Image: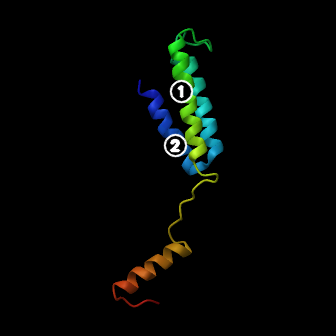
Amino acid sequence: MSAPIICLQTIILASLFWGRLSGLVGGLSASLTFTIWLFPPIGSLAIHDPVDRIMLVAFLLGAFVIVLLSPNKSSRLVPLGSRTDRMIWRLWDARRGRDVE
């Protein structure tokens, strides 16, 4: 089954870019979705097979470990044209021997 692996990757991205809370919400919503639509009986929150229960618990543990290892705050990307971006381009031009304003 590739659905849990894909969902773990999205939890990693959500945790990195938007913080721990969004990763936690993503993990819980993915596990709820798996419970309803992936494990029989389909459309119910009941899981009859013990192997499916273990798989769901393993997925939740993996999601919580990912969330705990992610940074507290979201990582913000520096927008183009920012002060840091201009400073990097000035250093780049200075190293290449161009005139710096």
- Residue on which disc 2 sits: 12
Report the residue at 55% width, 49% height from top: 16
In percent of width and height, residue 58 lies at: 53, 27
Q: Which numbered disc, 2 or 1, marks the residue closer to the eye? A: 1
Residue 100 location in percent, x, y?
Answer: 43, 89
Residue 56 appears in the picture as rendered: yes
Which residue is more in the foreground, 89 or 47? Answer: 47
Kind of residue indicated by mark 1: Ala
Q: Which residue is at 50% across, 36% downward?
A: 8
- Residue count near mark 1 (Cα–Cα under 10 Å), binned few <14, some 14–19, many ≥20: few
* x and y percentages locating residue 39 in the rendered image: 52, 15
**Toward the viewer: 84 or 47?**
47
Q: How many dots with numbers?
A: 2
Q: Amino acid at mark 2?
A: Ile
Q: Secondary structure at mark 1?
A: helix
Name the spot of residue 35 as percent of width and height, x first: 57, 19
Image quadrant in which the N terminus is located: top left
Q: How is the image coloured?
A: rainbow
Disc 2/disc 1 C-alpha distance (Å): 16 Å
Q: Which residue is mark 1?
A: 58
Q: Label 2 neighbourhood size at 10 Å, few (<14), some (14-19), many (20+)?
A: many
Q: In the figure, is residue 98 to the left or right of 44? A: left
- Of residues 58 and 42, the one drawn nearer to the viewer in this rendering: 58
Q: Are marks 2 and 1 in contact (CB under 8 Å)?
A: no
